[in-house]
Amino acid sequence: MVTQSPLSLVAIVPAAGVGSRMKAGKPKQYLTIAQKTVLEHTIEKLLAHPAVTLVVVAITDGDPYFPELSIATHPRVVRVSGGKERADSVLSALQYVHAQQLAEWVMVHDAARPCVRVEDLNTLISVSQTHDVGAILASPVRDTMKRSNLNGDIDHTVDREALWHALTPQMFKTEPLTRILNEALVAGAMITDEASAFEWAGLQPALVQGYADNIKITQPEDLALAEFYLKREKG
């Protein structure tokens, strides 16, 4: 059992997705940027933060790629079984953290977001620990937003005032997130991220403005953009 510290937390990385929109022949988290997979870049970013004691990665059973990575044998990386949906993978990791009493707090981060900045992690941790619920990184919507009709034509313009893009990490206490996420899934609620589980329960997490370059690699062109951001970060 890991000794708890007021500033320690466990990072959870759901990485069981197949990333079909990338059309790359393998899950997007295993595509490479500068001789490392996207997943390795992401995990290393989390491990580098002094408050993160462990990274729990949820991987599909039978995944042939993860065991080949050097990060798979890192002493502060633990693998658990991933689920069909993101929320199932997160819950699997949460149940492991909760059962082992590893940390009071968890920080859930997308496997395909390798460009998160340490400044954003610091701010998220600070805000989360002083908020009643927890917090997520987010970016204000800058573009004009349109809602379409059933034909794919414009129905109307959506007021972008107070609209945010939800990013990750999202940070909450282990026990309430585990309980509320499980209850939401049992109830059949649509849970797209951890914050939405708390919203379902009538709670309001905080929004922490983060850098917009914390992109999620989804489309083929995102890989080159992520590479640019990572190279710029290294100077």
Image: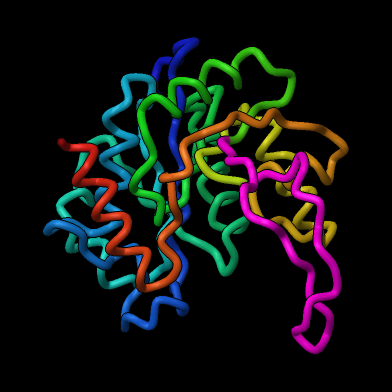
Say which residue appears at 66% left-offset and 27% top-offset: 134
Residue found at the far bottom of this picture: 151
Q: Is residue 193 above or below residue 64?
A: above
What's the image's color scheme? rainbow
Is residue 163 inside the magenta stretch? yes
Q: Quadrant of the C terminus?
A: top left
Relative image position of residue 11 (x, y in whole percent): 44, 36
Total marks placed: 0
Relative image position of residue 221 (x, y in whole percent): 35, 70
Horizontal arrangement in the rendering, residue 42 relative to residue 218 (left or right)? left
Q: Quadrant of the N terminus?
A: top left
Q: Between 226 and 55, which is closer to the camera in this rendering?
A: 226
Horizontal arrangement in the rendering, residue 40 relative to residue 146 (left or right)? left
Give the residues drawn in magenta, as a range: 137-165
User: Which of the 4 image quarters holds residue 19?
Assistant: bottom left
Q: Between 67 and 224, which is closer to the camera in this rendering?
A: 224
Relative image position of residue 217 (x, y in whole percent): 41, 61
User: Which of the 4 image quarters holds residue 128?
Assistant: top right
Say which residue appears at 27% left-offset and 29% top-offset: 48
Say which residue appears at 63% left-offset and 41% top-offset: 140
Q: Between 199 and 212, which is closer to the camera in this rendering?
A: 212
User: Which of the 4 image quarters holds residue 201?
Assistant: top right
Q: Is residue 207 above or below residue 44?
A: above
Relative image position of residue 227 (x, y in whole percent): 24, 55
Residue found at the far left of this picture: 35
Is residue 214 inside the magenta stretch? no
Horizontal arrangement in the rendering, residue 184 relative to residue 19 (left or right)? right
Q: Between 68 and 197, which is closer to the camera in this rendering?
A: 197
